[in-house]
Amino acid sequence: MSIIPLNPPLSPRNGHTLKVILPGRVSSPGPGKQNKEQSLGDQQDIQQRWLRRHTDLPVDVTVIAGSGSGELLEREEYKKLLRLIEYGEYDLVLTEDLGRIVRRTYAFIVCELCEDHDVRLIAINNHNVDTALRGWRDAAFFAAFFYEKDNRDKSDRLKERLRSRFLAGGALERRIFGYVDPPDGAKCDAERQRDAAAESIYQEWFRRLDEGATYEEIADWLNILGVRTGPYCVNNEWVGKMVCRCTHNPILKGLRRHNDRKTRRINATGKYVSEKADPEDLLTRHCPHLAFFEEDYFDRVTRTAKVNNSKFKPGKDGEDPRRGRPKKKTIWPGQHIFCGTCGRLYRYGGHGQNDHLLCRGAYEYRCWNAITVDGPKAAGKLSQAIVDELAGLPDFDADLLQRLEGEVHDLHNVHAKRIAEIDRELATVERRQENTAAGIAEYGPRRELQQQLDKLEAKQVLLWQDRRELLNMPQRKVLIPTAAEIRDLALEAFRNLAIESDEFSRLIRELISRIVVYPVRLVDRGHLVLRAQFLLNLVPLMPDAKHIQGMEQVLRRWLCVDLFDPPQREEFRASVMTEKTKSEGGQQRLNQHQIAAKLGITHTAVQRAAALQRKMDRLGVTDAYQIVTEPPGDYTKLRRHKHPRYRLEPLPFVELF
């Protein structure tokens, strides 16, 4: 294949290998994952063919592909591309067109970022968008302008089409419970009919709401009757939010609405949010044959239901306290604690307390564990347990050091041998490419020869990627840190950060993948409390540790932390038994009153501590707490499992310790 020269030609920084980024994007994955992968594959084929036509240099390719709107600035693929450009090691960003990277004026900004970091950007289908050419700014600016204008024009045409369709009786909303369509589907409201079987259900539904019933109570009633949800519901079970939406749908009084909401783009992120539309944009049409209620009765009942259910809305006066704030950005240990009973995530707001966390399954009546976690107290206890574990990290023994030194020696040898093997494989691939190219020159562009050449090129790209990763590994001698160095590094990282800070949250998530809590109870009964268990991994604090397999085992350990303050009988149990043992051992004999005075507690507390120890001795256990795997019958504070809506549904990955 003859090479089409560029002016100026493609030039690698390192003098021998061209490092290229191939960005790709699809707006929507389509009906299946296969369509998404096929579309992204087509883009990569275009980019690879362009490279083969315009350069004969060895190419090191990094593919960044994904799906999502081109206006969205929070896509991980887009952020990764910007980081690689700023990294300063790549020579070329090759894209099918600028819209495959990002839309709006940010496409022009990406071009300028490439120019700042001496990375050439070429858009194959955008004429003259090549940052090595003098007039690339004009071409990139008009390309970005075209994308913005094209999006706006398409949106306006679609809105006008839907508006005309609605005025003609079409543009139907999705069918809710109580309505039926003909077998071939309805094109207008005239073809849609009420379901006669839903008449009595809606009448009782609204009667209960008028008498003060909540949406959740209506949902429970519908589920007990076995009433099926609408055809577009994911679950065949009613919930309060679903009842609320159906209750306030004006089609129940025979009124169809259109354009009552609109979307608005947040320019800083590219996301679209839904908000109320301007009153002049609202379109309505009357459909008397679809009405279940008179208009006056419908309006009165919905107003009553809204007032009766307003107290269940979050925040003050129904306003969401986290509105406008990222939902995933929360104070640790939020978004990090999982329930050991059902496997679901704990979230803030347990039992109306903003600083307490409760299992999501308990909210949804899918878990009986409704015990809350005190967020600030749990954060303090967990961080203190980690600090104590670090402070007590033992020194490495001689056998362990000898084994680790052997692994480091093997690591250096394997590293060098693997690079040599890749070099030999690359030489073999290049010889086979030359032979295949000679065959094409002699016998013409036959299909089997071209396929063989494509396979060799793909293998060459993979080998170059493996070689690059090996070369990027630390070339200096890997040193085995001492236990004291590990302790000092970890303790410094913890002490310099506030528990409430985002930096502390990011650090702790690197060291702990997940925290699992499970309910426990004293053997002599009492309140249910939560105990946490997690795997502490110190490898992220030591850059070289991930290359030494033995170090990973040393730097990982399981921790168990009580997220509660023990009652007095458990707190002083060991001290009481120590004093009693001293008396029985021939030392000065103390009675229970004297032990109480010495420990600063009451005589009753000493008696209860001794009784707890006797109970443990009878059971043959050393831990005063036992795991609770089902709701106790004698514990009146847990009543989730008594509710008719309750159904235990643990997630499949639950781990009970």
Image: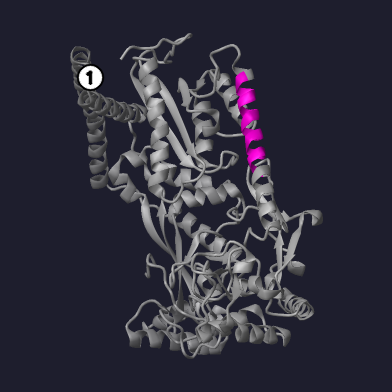
Q: Main secondary structure of the magenta part?
A: helix
Specify whether residue 154 is painted magenta. yes
Is 635 in front, or is 617?
Answer: 635
Residue carrying label 1: 433
Please identify the quadrant where the C terminus is shown: bottom left
Q: Residue at x 49, y 88 (%)?
A: 608
Whether 499 is drawn above or below 309: the answer is: above
Number of numbered discs on residues: 1
Whether 550 is drawn above or below 108: the answer is: below
Give the crowd class for mark 1: few <14, some 14-19, many >=20 residues within 10 Å. Answer: some
Q: Residue at x 63, y 29 (%)?
A: 146
* Percent position of residue 537, x then y: 40, 51
* Percent position of residue 467, x then y: 30, 27
| Residue 565 in sight | no
* Residue range highlighted in magenta: 139-155
| Residue 442 in sight | yes
Image quarter of residue 405: top left
Q: Residue at x 55, y 51 (%)?
A: 505
Is 519 in front, or is 310?
Answer: 310
Specify whether residue 419 is painted magenta. no
Whether 493 is drawn above or below 288: the answer is: above
Q: Secondary structure at mark 1?
A: helix
* Percent position of residue 513, x then y: 44, 55
**Which three-letter amino acid code belongs to the residue tagged 1?**
Gln
Whether 280 is drawn above or below 343: the answer is: above
In the picture, measured across the screen, residue 279 lies left or right of residue 289, that is right
* Percent position of residue 31, x then y: 44, 51
